[in-house]
Amino acid sequence: MLRLLADENFNNDIVRGLLLRDPAIDLVRIQDAGLLRADDPAVLGWAAEHDRILLTHDRATVPDYAYQRLLAGELMPGVFVLNDRLPVRQAIDELYLVCECSDTADWVGRVVHLPI
């Protein structure tokens, strides 16, 4: 099962809906990890340290920092970028499908825009 980390500004309706659909999903919010207001490099570092794929709506900066980690030879377990205009139900369905049909190793070093 995938281990996920929801970015500070990630839609909490998606988080709640995903956990209601499957309470066994391993998802931590930035707020619960003590990283409130942390910058993107710190968030990506924490995600790497805890082997968690980052969920974000931030298309502008997070992918660039993720690629910088890769270029520096640092671990980057993966990033799922979801368009913030994606309907909540569709976002939940997309994430649930990815969680059910893949392994953590499938996403290492990848920045993926959902829906695929």
Image: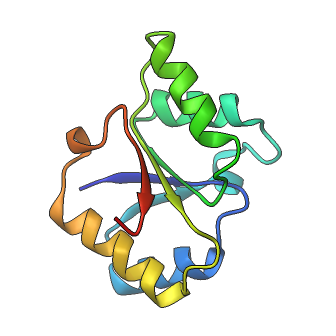
x then y, percent, for residue 48: 47, 30
Q: Say if residue 23 shows up in the picture.
A: no
Residue 5 against residue 108 in the figure, above or below: below
x then y, percent, for residue 55: 52, 56
Exactly how many numbered labels are in the figure?
Answer: 0
Q: Is residue 114 left or right of residue 62?
A: left
x then y, percent, for residue 15: 54, 73
x then y, percent, for residue 73: 43, 10
Snapshot quadrant of residue 21: bottom left
Q: Residue at x 55, y 87 (%)?
A: 87
Residue most toward the top? 72
Snapshot quadrant of residue 109: top left
User: Looking at the figure, which quarter contains the C terminus?
Assistant: bottom left
User: Looking at the figure, which quarter contains the N terminus?
Assistant: bottom left
Q: Residue at x 40, y 69 (%)?
A: 115
Q: Is residue 116 left or right of residue 53?
A: left
Which residue is at the front of the view, 85 or 78? 85
Snapshot quadrant of residue 12: bottom right
Q: Is residue 54 left or right of residue 2?
A: right
Q: Residue at x 27, y 64 (%)?
A: 99
Q: Is residue 39 left or right of residue 53?
A: right
Which residue is at the front of the view, 81 or 30? 81
Please say which color scheme the image uses: rainbow
Q: Say if residue 37 shows up in the picture.
A: yes
Q: Residue at x 70, y 41 (%)?
A: 61
